[in-house]
Amino acid sequence: MAEAALPELAAVPWRGRVDARYLQRRGWLWTLQTVAFVVPFTAAGILLIALEPLALPVALASFAHGWVIPELHAFRGSNTIRPPRGPRNERAEPIAQGLLGDLLGHEPRELQRESGLAMERGTLGVWLLGEAGAVLVTGGGKRVHCFCVGTADHDLPPSDRIAHLLLALRTDEEGFATVANHAFSGAPWRLRRRIRKEQRPALRRAVREAR
Amino acid sequence: MSKLIRMDHTGHSTLAEWTEDNPEACEAAIREFRRELDEGCIGMVSDGPGKATQVRELPLDADLVILRRPIAGG
């Protein structure tokens, strides 16, 4: 007996199923929120300088607010694919990587070994799966959505954690996006600056694939 | 030879191996599969690139059945 829907959906019955339209709306809300931070703080800074040039330090503080808050949001997004802190089960990693490698194709396997992220093309876009989160590239490569999602078994080696996410994603992509917690949405360049250096080629590749 | 494996702290453990013409091995694999499901594992069969299926009964004709733990939003 086979089932199409992700069983984990039973744990979040209050959530509507995530689809492409939901993600598009969510993306617009994130853009609106970013504009709502950047525009008032920047306008206030300009106005202060115009009214009283001696208020330059206060104006600079206002500009900084308008810059820092969206940066913190992007940082939160980058945290979703950052390997978790603390002890990792590296001993079993070669075995786990073998299984994950069998599940992935040749190119995604190489990319995962270099970046720690598994790339998977879905119907919603191109996914990058980390140990405790995922990034979805949509909109022809113009937008990323970051999700916090993972298994609670902390003894698993890193590649097994990714394999858990990969199998769940392949079972029910929209269900996977529903179970995961949405953490950030924005332009890929905002995320690229915040992720680890070895992860950047994977994001570049996913953006290219999404075009 | 078909295999039932569970992803765990060792990378993965082989819980059962069977061939369809060996009823005893099949029964042992089914028992093991049900026991793991009762403990909260989820049975999966990889259907090639980009596709996987959740199974609630052991598909004896599958080459590889993988048991995983549930995932949740972090």
Image: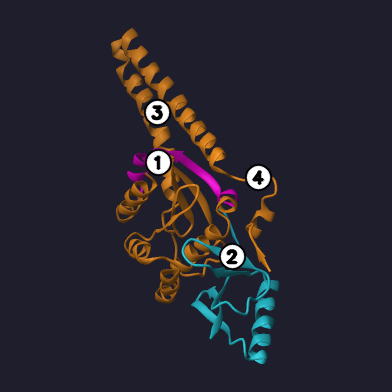
Chain colours: A orange, B cyan
What residue is pinned by disc 3?
A65
What residue is pinned by disc 4?
A15
Residue at 48% over, 54% down: A133
As for residue A179 lying within the magenta part, the answer is: yes
Number of other residues with Cα within 10 Å of mark 4, as a class: few under 14, some 14 to 19, many 20 or more: few
Q: Nearer the viewer, residue B65 or A162?
A: B65
Query: Looking at the rendered structure, which numbered label has been put on residue B53?
Result: 2
Quadrant in the picture for residue A102: bottom left
Q: Secondary structure at mark 1?
A: helix
| Residue A210 rendering spot, x and y as whole percentages | 39, 46
Give the CA distance from mark 2 to mark 3.
47 Å
Residues drawn in magenta: A177-195
Give the CA distance from mark 4 to mark 3.
33 Å
Q: Secondary structure at mark 2?
A: strand
Q: Nearer the viewer, residue A133 or A118?
A: A118
Marks 1,2: beta carbons within 8 A = no
As for residue A6 lying within the magenta part, the answer is: no
Q: Nearer the viewer, residue A141 or B69?
A: A141
Task: Point out the image quarter for the C terminus of chain A.
Answer: top left
What residue is pinned by disc 1?
A140
| Residue A86 rendering spot, x and y as whole percentages | 44, 62
Give the CA distance from mark 3 to mark 1.
31 Å
Quadrant in the picture for residue A55: top left
Q: Answer yes or no: is residue B48 visible.
A: yes
Q: Amino acid at mark 3?
A: His
Q: Secondary structure at mark 4?
A: loop
